[in-house]
Image (cartoon, rainbow, N blue to C red):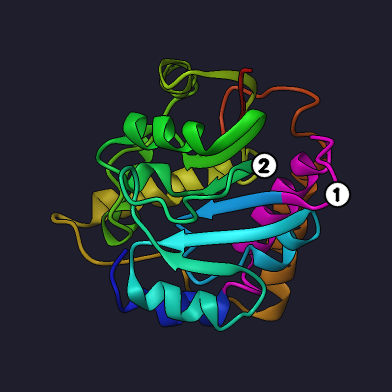
Amino acid sequence: MDAELYPLMAEVEDSHWWFCSRRAIVASVISRLGLSPGARILEPGCGTGGNFAMLARFGEVYAMDSDPEACKFAGARKTAIVEPGKLPDRVPFENASFDLVVMTDVLEHLAGDQEALTALRARLKPGGWLLATVPAFPFLWSVHDVAHHHQRRYVAGDLRALFERAGFTVDQLNYYNFLLFPVIAAARLLGRLRKSSPQREHDLRAHSGLVNSLLRTVFSSERYTIGHFAVPFGVSLLVVARRGP
């Protein structure tokens, strides 16, 4: 991600409708995993630490990021043990193994996504979980992806195959952010038509209180449906996979 976006992310991450809704959906999924009290949770690519308070409800949080600026913001939250690190070959906390790894929109940044998953599998306890969210559908590629240094967007079948090649058993795989999909897809496609060349833009704009509340209500309501029925489209994908014995 462009370095100048970290202060903006730190400023809006606790209230922006998209971050809040994603946290609500991820928390709903984690609550069904049956983690033991005191579970160890690792968040690679933690950014500015907006997920820490949510993850701390389920266990002891460890986190890593490759960007020093992100680590600075994340460490200031004082709700996780934060260390610099980079996938696949510089995962800190060498003496710890984890019950759950949570990667929210991280995998798409990595040139070696399978190598990263293989490295994280090695740090999970037998039977441990990995939960990841990623952006969906290559046709939605936009200047937002460029600004955030994305390598790719995924479709469900390719994401399942990726996790299986890395040695995981996929327990749940769902498109989400489907209620707002028509609006977001139209905006992304129209944006591409308007611009002849990629520009450094992003979706971290602050919205009015009313708009932010409305979007948050619509998007976060999907926490009641995800995992219960599948839809064939969405702006993002969520996968829950398990390490075998």
Marks 2 and 1, the one that precedes in the sequence? 1
Q: Which residue lies under the disc numbered 2?
A: 179
Q: Amino acid at mark 1?
A: Pro
Question: Tag 2, which secondary structure?
Answer: loop
Label 2: few (<14), some or many (≥20) within 10 Å? some
In the image, which disc is placed on residue 37? 1
Observer-nearest residue: 203 or 165?
165
Q: Quadrant of residue 1?
A: bottom left
**x, y percent for residue 114:** 35, 29
Q: Is 94 drawn above or below residue 153 in the view shown?
A: below
Observer-nearest residue: 49 or 42?
42
* 11 displayed left or right of 227: left
Q: Is 85 drawn above or below residue 190 in the view shown?
A: below
Q: Quadrant of the C terminus?
A: top right
In the image, which disc is placed on residue 106? none
**x, y percent for residue 12:** 56, 77
* 239 displayed left or right of 160: right
- The residue that appears at 62% across and 70% down in the rendered structure is 16
- The residue that appears at 67% across and 70% down in the rendered structure is 212
- Magenta highlight range: 13-39
**x, y percent for residue 135:** 45, 42
Q: Amino acid at mark 2?
A: Leu
Question: Tag 1, which secondary structure?
Answer: loop
- The residue that appears at 53% across and 47% down in the rendered structure is 103
- The residue that appears at 47% across and 70% down in the rendered structure is 204
